[in-house]
Amino acid sequence: MTFAVTSSSSSTAISGSSFPRSSASPDPKVPQIGSVRFADRHATVNLSRRRCAVKPVNAEPKRNDSIVPLAATIAAPEISEKIEAEDFEQLAKELDNASSLEIMDKALEKFGNDIAIAFSGAEDVALIEYAKLTGRPFRVFSLDTGRLNPETYRFFNEVEKHYGIRMEYMFPDAVEVQALVRSKGLFSFYEDGHQECCRVRKVRPLRRALKGLHAWITGQRKDQSPGTRSEVPVVQVDPVFEGLDGGIGSLVKWNPVANVDGKDMWNFLRAMNVPVNTLHSQGYVSIGCEPCTRPVLPGQHEREGRWWWEDAKAKECGLHKGNLKQDSAAQLNGNGNGASHANGTATQSDIFNSQSLVTLSRTGIENLARLENRKEPWLVVLYAPWCHFCQAMEESYVELAEKLAGSGVKVAKFRADGEQKEYAKTELQLGSFPTILFFPKHSSKPIKYASEKRDVDSLMAFINALR
């Protein structure tokens, strides 16, 4: 992995790296620049307590698909103590009036080498500047969807040179991209919504990256998107993605500029002479993939330049889908227009798509449940495609299915929302989505998977213990 590393003259020495370093400015005025307080902006936080043990990154050698394993080449200060039952809701309240620099410093102090900045190639370059000003080592990664503007790629290169860093670029799976383009074409998102394309090109690569971290840092601001980001706190337990320990609640999400408005962000960038994407000078404010981004006119909101053919109140690509209210998320379809079937089932694209997975109908699941002597055991997930917890486990469940192909264990899915929900609740132990059931060979009663750890290894251990 490639890291963004900075150090001050008093910080711990960084060894084992072939990457260039930049030094934090010794100018005593810097903290004053970064410590402007944006008061009277309060976030509503809805979080749970989470015990988080931050370990050296090379303690997890099996996770080769994350951005963390190569971190063993750089010796950042280690945090060995446990954060006992950290209350991030209380921490968010304590930091709500703190400056972005203070919040960034607290994030890097708490998580050391197990946190990284997610850089999109837009004005969130301010995050890298704040990280540099703290004088602490920091890391940066970015998602290369394959459809970014040429200006954004040049901007990545300019940022690396300016800060003397190397960013880790995460790429979508080539086979998934190929399948999507061959089946639907290059611009299907204009017809059936951006969610499917974003899931392949952005969400899944991000999920791989975050599985190797305990925390990540984003450039979300409350004023960026009407209806989805107005209550973003400065720190929260990530409601969607999983971290190094696995399971929902295993990842902390920091939003240091949540309380900063766009004008103040740009004043900071100009004051610090930070490089910016040249697209901004052409009328682009919020910048994403080239086909889904356009300039905005004076007076238009910045998010009106993103997915302009969709509902302005639901413009999230999936990276920050936890911002959507639960009832809104349940009704959003691929077009983001809130339409749904008459039976209450969201018209969003299906998930868990693989030739190694069996799709069960209502009749199929009923027949499976009635059998007392099955030829082979079955693992079945009860899901709803709009549920972000189901989406979060999609990659691991498909991987499990492919791994178990030909092993004598059938892996299946049953869509249990809408008209099927009541049956699933009364007959299949459905409590919430997703619910995972194991149907043994010689028993009619299925066994419910109780853990929230839905990674491949945990699910495989569950299966091996029962078959």
Image (cartoon, rainbow, N blue to C red):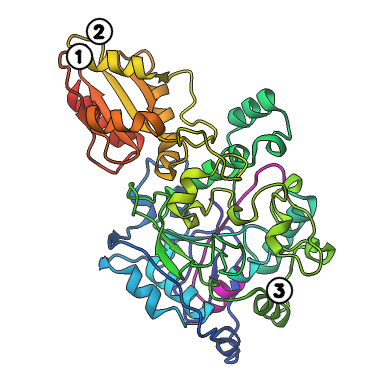
Mark 2: which amino acid?
Lys
Q: Dot 2: what SS?
A: loop
* Local secondary structure at mark 1: loop
Residue sitting farthest toward the front:
342
Considering only order in the chain, which callout, 3 or 2, is on the residue closer to the N terminus? 3
| Residue 230 in the image: above or below residue 153 | below
- Circle 3 is placed at which residue position? 274
Choose between 286 and 226: the one closer to the eye. Answer: 226
The residue under label 2 is 375
Residue 34, percent from left and from top:
57, 83
Highlighted range, magenta: 128-147
Residue type highlighted by circle 3:
Val
| Name of the residue lying farthest toward the right | 282
Give the mark, 3 or 1, whose residue is nearer the N terminus. Answer: 3
The answer to whether residue 217 is magenta is no
* Disc 2 versus disc 3: nearer the observer: 2
Q: Which is nearer the eye, 71 or 87?
A: 87
Left or right placement of residue 455 versus residue 124 in this view: left
Check disc 1: other Cα within 10 Å, few if <14, some if 14-19, many if 20+: some
Determine the secondary structure under disc 3. loop
User: In this orientation, which residue lies closer to the viewer: 419 or 272?
Assistant: 419
Residue type at the position of mark 1: Lys
Say few, some or many: other residues with alpha carbon within 10 Å of mark 2 (under 14 / 14 to 19 / 20 or more).
Answer: few
Where is mark 1, residue-wise? 441
Is 140 covered by the magenta stretch?
yes
Placement of 3 over or under 399, stated as above or below: below
Left or right of 186 on screen, residue 108: left
Tell me whether the residue at label 2 lies in contact with that at label 1, contact meaning CB atoms closer than 8 angstroms.
Answer: yes
Tell me residue 230's x, y (percent): 53, 67
Q: CA distance from mark 2 to mark 3?
A: 64 Å
* Number of marks present in the image shown: 3
